[in-house]
Image (cartoon, grey):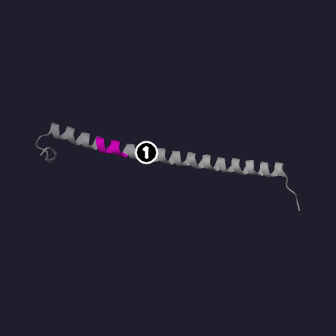
């Protein structure tokens, strides 16, 4: 049986803490990346909607007889 003194226990605790910290950092980076990608997707979807509406209004102004302008 291997005996463990205070130094070995402290070293094990520090290594465990460092590993846990690195996993938490990795998870936080993943969450940030995912949130950033979702935000970009949402913004591009909103931009597409706004551009569609803008085109619709411009077409309605150009042709007052079109169904869109009624």
The picture places residue 39, in percent across and down from the top left corner, at 43, 45
Of all residues, the one furthest to the bottom in this rendering is 1
**Viewer-closest of 66 and 47:** 47
Mark 1 Cα-neighbour bin, 10 Å: few <14, some 14–19, many ≥20? few
Q: Residue at x 14, y 43 (%)?
A: 69
User: Which range is magenta?
Assistant: 45-50
The picture places residue 7, in percent across and down from the top left corner, at 83, 48
Kindly identify which residue carries mark 1: 39
- Name the secondary structure under disc 1: helix
Quarter of the image where the N terminus is located: bottom right
Q: Residue at x 38, y 43 (%)?
A: 44
Q: Residue at x 61, y 46 (%)?
A: 25
Q: Quadrant of residue 57?
A: top left
Query: In the image, is residue 20 part of the stretch drawn in magenta?
Result: no
Q: Quadrant of residue 2?
A: bottom right
Left or right, 55 with reference to 6: left
The picture places residue 34, in percent across and down from the top left corner, at 50, 48
């Amino acid at each position: 049986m291997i005996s463990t003194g205070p130094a070995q226990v402290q070293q094990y605790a520090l290594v465990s803490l460092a590993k846990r910290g690195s996993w938490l950092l990795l998870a936080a980076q993943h969450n940030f990346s995912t949130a950033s990608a979702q935000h970009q997707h949402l913004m591009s979807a909103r931009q597409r909607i706004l551009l569609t509406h803008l085109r619709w209004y411009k077409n309605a102004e150009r042709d007052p007889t079109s169904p869109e302008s009624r």
